[in-house]
């Protein structure tokens, strides 16, 4: 072990409480509350390291205690923040991106053309880019880039007849994608869209996007509309996001399969299509709505255009500072159901991007660029993301881990097993990871990095699909979708039925993000301390929560955790008979965690049936932007067979009616920094 590794381990992992100690504290808390008999929680999960040093904990707890008062859980149809903070809605679905028009119509009657000039639906990842240029650090003027992940038909269209129509499909396409808008803060501290900004831009499912990286031009990416396989129309399933140090936005395509299908009775998806969840009915992954685009646009008909889905499922790079520049799909970063991506710099100046594939029993990836980041000349980084090495994570039960290279000839990716080269791996990334023998995870959602300590965290939101089928039996032919695998538990995914999810952290060895080995532990098991089942109580040192999804680390090293309990399980969806697993946790929320102490405190509660996602701050940390996604989702009437129930009317209020996803700005009344 070299000196650097020794130091890193001391800083990041050594001196921490053993998991048993944390479990014992959790149990002690519960026993005080419930007078129950102790069950050794640690016995369920084995000696996973978790928590942190008590001396650090005492110090940090004092610091956090001065910042804000922890909120109680809430079922109110509003955004709550601690005393001394305020919330402003700055960019909601339907708001015109140029700040002028066309105006949002509450009855859903805006046309597709209107929608293409308005905020799309269901904000997810977002990033604030300071103006005037990529190196500037203004905290009162900047570009907000934000993803629009999917649509709810009953809110978007409001009529079954329109939904299946050409206009309905066109409006659905226009509500997907990305918005870039210019924001400015006035002297009173209020944020507003800058009118007529030259930067204001929508990228939709119809926008022209270049294809970069090893899959560019591959025969499997060629279609009649693009015989060279180099340019695709649109981006969909824009879930979470990332950015580059040269000031570009990375939008990540997740549940792209939902827009593809076929009415051809003879159509059967291939094994490769099944591995990505593609089917005749347009099914995406769990919970993904039905979008019958193939009924109006033949390029989404799998029987007619089998190659079109190979052009989705990538990280897409957008330059918010240059509205005339075409976005690029970076195929070298792999094709899967991308959640977000976050980077660390390697010791030799290259970049390592960490990425999760969000579906039950899918994998965690790392992409390391071949070239170095050039901080002086922006143009030199233009195609940095087209060349590099993709890896997938294998977690060992002893706390070590290996990044398996997904390269031709390595880890079983040989001609003997049917692999034809780098483009093949870029297009069939999930199958490559199967073959390499990666660890199947409990739905990897966001990854967050601490660029000072090189620590990386990932949320594993939940998983009900573990069983007795060894992973190796699922990892041989590339046809075993995460949805059919039933791998047994292991130390990094320790729960047989992971209702509440957990957060795992790791550090690549030798303090170098290029390293092919790492050390990991479980940061926290989410749960409800009031549960009788010890496996559901969690290991929180602080406020209870479930289903962590959004995750971000600010410049102080504070970890922000955002939750996405399925709206159908939230207490507000079942008045009178709430789901016992989530009855006490209230609406989805955002919590602040101290990675050094493990202390977790509730900072924000969202409106009814929303998801809270997409945190970022201005450089001076006086404004935090957060996205409120799909308020009132459980009332959505996906097949438009009846009148939707309106569980939420956030943010416009009951008189207006239609709930809207939106970006909010959180500031302090005294102008101070957030969370301090
Ligand atoms: Fe779009 Fe995995 O959340
Ligand atoms: Ca998510
Ligand atoms: Ca989620
Ligand atoms: Ca969601």
Image: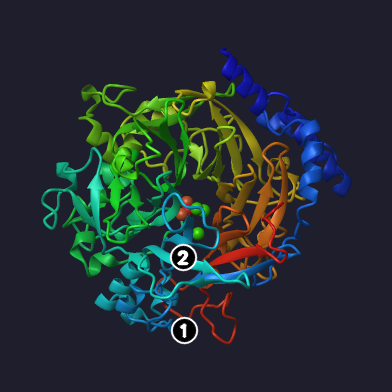
Q: List x then y, in percent, for residue 155.
A: 45, 76
Question: Which of the 4 image quadrants contains residue 602?
Answer: bottom right
Residue 475 lies, with reference to residue 63, above or below; the image says: above
Mark 2 touching mark 1, by CB under 8 A?
no
Q: Is residue 97 left or right of residue 206?
A: right
Quadrant (top left, top right, bottom left, bottom right) of the N terminus:
top right
Q: List x then y, in percent, for residue 419.
A: 23, 29
For image coordinates 59% across by 47% down, the residue present is: 554
Residue 242 tag number = none
Disc 2 is placed on an element classified as: loop
Residue 301 lies, with reference to residue 544, above or below; the image says: below
**Dot 1 crowding, Cα within 10 Å, few <14, some 14–19, many 20+:** some
Q: Is residue 94 left or right of residue 291?
A: right
For image coordinates 69% across by 53% down, the residue present is: 675
| Residue 17 visible at all | yes
Residue 106 tag number = 1
In front here: 345 or 540?
Answer: 345
Disc 1 is placed on an element classified as: loop
**Dot 2 crowding, Cα within 10 Å, few <14, some 14–19, many 20+:** many
User: What whole-number distance in Å separates the C-alpha atoms at marks 2 and 1?
Assistant: 16 Å
For image coordinates 69% across by 40% down, the residue present is: 535
Residue 121 lies, with reference to residue 220, above or below; the image says: below
Label 2 sits on residue: 122
Q: List x then y, in percent, for residue 405.
A: 36, 26
Q: Ligand 4 within 8 A of label 2's CB?
A: yes
Q: Is residue 3 left or right of residue 412?
A: right
Q: Earlier in the sequence, mark 2 or mark 1?
A: 1
């Amino acid at each position: 072990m070299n000196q650097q590794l020794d130091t890193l381990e001391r800083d990041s992992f050594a001196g921490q409480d053993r998991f048993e100690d944390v479990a014992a504290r959790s149990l002690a808390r519960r026993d005080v509350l419930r007078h129950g008999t102790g069950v050794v929680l640690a016995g369920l999960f084995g000696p996973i390291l978790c928590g942190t040093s008590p001396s650090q904990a005492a110090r940090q707890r004092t610091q956090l205690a001065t910042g804000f008062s922890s909120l109680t859980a809430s079922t109110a149809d509003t955004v709550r923040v601690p005393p001394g903070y305020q919330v402003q809605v700055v960019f909601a679905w339907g708001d015109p991106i140029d700040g002028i028009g066309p105006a949002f119509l509450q009855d859903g009657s805006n046309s597709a053309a209107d929608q293409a000039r308005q905020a799309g639906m269901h904000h997810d990842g977002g990033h604030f880019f300071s103006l005037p240029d990529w190196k500037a650090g203004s905290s009162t003027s900047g570009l907000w880039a934000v993803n629009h992940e999917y649509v709810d038909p009953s809110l978007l269209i409001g009529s079954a007849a329109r939904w299946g129509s050409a206009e309905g499909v066109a409006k659905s396409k226009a509500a997907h994608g990305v918005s870039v808008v210019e924001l400015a803060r006035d002297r009173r501290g209020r944020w507003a869209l800058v009118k007529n900004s030259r930067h204001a831009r929508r990228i939709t499912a119809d926008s022209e996007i270049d294809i970069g990286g090893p899959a560019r031009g591959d025969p499997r990416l060629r279609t009649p509309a693009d015989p060279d396989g180099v340019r695709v129309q649109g981006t969909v399933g824009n879930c979470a996001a990332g950015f580059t140090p040269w000031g570009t936005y990375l939008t990540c395509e997740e549940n792209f399969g939902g827009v593809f299908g076929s009415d051809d009775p003879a159509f059967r998806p291939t094994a490769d299509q099944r591995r990505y969840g593609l089917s005749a009915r347009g099914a995406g992954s769990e919970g993904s709505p039905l979008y019958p685009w193939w009924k109006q646009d033949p390029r989404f008909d799998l029987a007619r255009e089998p190659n079109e889905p190979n052009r989705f499922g990538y990280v897409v790079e957008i330059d918010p500072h240059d509205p005339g520049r075409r976005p690029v799909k970076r195929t070298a970063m792999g094709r899967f159901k991308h959640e977000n991506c976050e980077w660390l710099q390697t010791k030799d100046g290259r970049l390592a991007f960490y990425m999760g594939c969000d579906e039950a029993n899918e994998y965690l990836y790392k992409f390391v660029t071949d070239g170095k980041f050039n901080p002086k000349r922006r143009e030199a980084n233009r195609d940095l993301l087209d060349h590099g090495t993709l890896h997938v994570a294998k977690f060992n039960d002893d706390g070590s881990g290996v990044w398996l290279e997904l390269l031709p000839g390595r880890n079983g990716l040989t001609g003997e097993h049917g692999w034809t080269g780098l483009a093949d791996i870029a297009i069939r990334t999930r199958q490559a990871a199967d073959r390499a023998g990666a660890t199947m995870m409990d739905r990897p959602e966001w990854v967050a990095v601490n660029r000072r300590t090189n620590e990386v965290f990932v949320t594993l939101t939940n998983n009900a699909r573990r069983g007795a089928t060894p992973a190796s039996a699922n990892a041989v032919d590339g046809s075993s979708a995460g949805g059919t695998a039933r791998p047994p538990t292991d130390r990094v995914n320790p729960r047989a039925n992971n209702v509440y999810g957990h957060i795992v952290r790791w550090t690549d060895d030798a303090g170098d993000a290029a390293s092919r080995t790492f050390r990991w532990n479980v940061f926290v098991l989410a749960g409800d301390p009031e549960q009788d089942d010890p496996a559901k109580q969690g290991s929180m040192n602080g406020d209870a929560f479930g289903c962590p999804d959004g995750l971000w680390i600010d410049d102080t090293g504070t970890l922000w955790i955002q939750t996405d309990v399925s709206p159908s399980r939230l207490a507000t969806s079942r008045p009178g008979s709430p789901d016992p697993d989530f009855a006490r946790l209230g609406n989805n929320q955002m919590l602040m965690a101290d990675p050094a102490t493990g202390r977790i405190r509730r900072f924000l509660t969202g409106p009814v049936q929303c998801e809270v996602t997409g945190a970022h701050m201005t450089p001076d940390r006086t404004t935090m932007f957060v996205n409120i996604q799909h308020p009132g989702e459980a009332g959505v009437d996906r097949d438009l067979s009846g009148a939707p129930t309106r569980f939420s009317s956030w943010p416009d209020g009951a008189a207006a009616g239609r709930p809207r996803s939106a970006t909010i700005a959180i500031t302090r009344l005294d102008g101070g920094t957030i969370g301090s």
